Amino acid sequence: MTPPDSIQAIVLTEHGGPDVLHSARVPLPSPGPGQVRVRTGAVGVNFIETYQRAGIYPVQLPFTPGMEAAGTVEAVGEGVTGLSVGDRVTTTETEATYAEAFVVDAERAVVIPASVDIQTAAAVSLQGVTAHYLSTSSYPARSGEVALVHAGAGGVGLLLTQLLATAGVTVITTTSTPKKAALSRAAGAQHTIGYDAFATRVRELTGGRGVDVVYDGVGKDTFDGSLASLRIRGTFVLFGGASGQVPPFNLQRLNTAGSITITRPTSTHFLLNRAEREWRYRELFEAIEAGTLAVRIGATFPLAEAAAAHRALEGRGTTGKTLLIPGR
Ligand code: NDP
């Protein structure tokens, strides 16, 4: 018999392809001191979960994936101040969110403004924070500069393009289909190009100079071309490996490519404290409210169909954000 306080969750007991993601009943988690339990409204699907599922990033089995979700606080642990039952919150800094409920440290749960719905809040959390820190902290591109953004119709790509374009940056994006190119242009990209010989196209579009910055979340397949697309003393921001991780790299290549600066950031290092977290989310929510940031939810899947969501993400079949919805 199903215990009354169990929930549906996605559990993997072995590494492998999307089919290792199974739906199961697990105990309802209890919030510890300083934590809240959230009834999940929408789960953000992110590439990192495909790396964990496949065993590229180490995780302990059995494992419930998910670091991002939004929902409603339904239980409050000891010592929590500032959050109450019924508050709508979102987070990108917890675990096991592929579930009908999850726990999160109260200080890592951000209250969603009344004007923003739960799915939009889930959709803008990790990818929005990433787009925000890439464009404000990893390399704060300025008005008049030129940026190359790979996967321009992806989750991070669409948000990053909008933030850069709003700041007056000229954005060139790569995309793999005409439909994705159209979405990227609608987000503010001035030029959309394919992946074939993209460095040559970038040189043509910049009069031979190269771009000031490349934001590259595709990784293995684009790395060499990205390096070849930069101006002298340009900045390479490598933030992911949708096509695979970049293999070990000889630093001397940065010298010959033009005294390039390179960084490989990760989101947790850009949410270091409450003030930094609040600043990034505030700016994202304000931009949504002002209508300068559109959050595209490209696809939603029932929670039980997490495998299909992973297949779509890895198969380049998604645009914008992919969400899992419990109870559907
Ligand atoms: P996207 O929605 O951008 O999906 C990935 C896209 O990459 C695809 O849609 C596809 O677009 C493109 N792509 C190019 N080559 C491949 C390939 N071989 N296989 C699959 N996709 C490919 O995903 P996200 O916005 O969620 O994430 C983008 C990147 O950012 C990922 O690498 C992710 O790990 C990283 N990331 C990093 C963070 C950080 O803090 N460092 C935080 C969040 C995400 P197209 O078909 O147009 O080429």
Image (cartoon, rainbow, N blue to C red):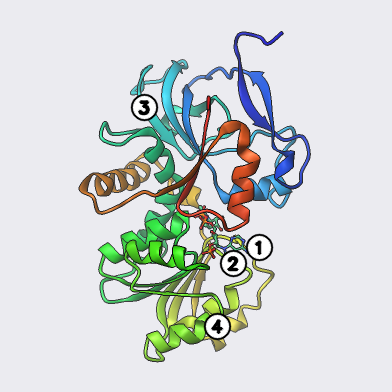
Up the image or down, 62 lies above or below 242; here it is above
Q: Amino acid at mark 2?
A: Gly
Q: Is residue 58 visible?
A: no
Q: Is mark 1 within 8 Å of ligand 1?
A: yes
Q: Is mark 4 within 8 Å of ligand 1?
A: no
Q: Is residue 125 visible?
A: yes
Residue at far front of view = 179
Mark 1 or mark 4, whichever is nearer to me: 4
Q: Is mark 3 within 8 Å of ligand 1?
A: no
Mark 2 sits on what residue?
219
**Quarter of the picture for ligand 1?**
bottom right
| Nearer to the camera, 60 or 156 | 156
Mark 3 sits on what residue?
88
Report if the CB atoms under discs 1 and 2 are less than 8 Å apart.
yes
Mark 2 or mark 4, whichever is nearer to me: 4
The CA distance from mark 2 to mark 4 is 15 Å
- 136 relative to 168 in the view: left or right: right
Q: Is mark 2 within 8 Å of ligand 1?
A: yes
Dot label at residue 244: 1
- 218 relative to 250 in the view: left or right: left
Dot label at residue 197: 4
Q: Amino acid at mark 4?
A: Ala
Q: Amino acid at mark 1?
A: Gly
Residue at far right of view = 14
Q: Amino acid at mark 3?
A: Arg
- 167 relative to 307 in the view: left or right: left
| Nearer to the camera, 285 or 139 | 285
Mark 1 / mark 3, whichever is N-terminal: 3
The CA distance from mark 1 to mark 2 is 6 Å
The CA distance from mark 1 to mark 4 is 19 Å
The CA distance from mark 3 to mark 4 is 46 Å
At horizontal 65% and vertical 63% (from top left) the residue drawn is: 245
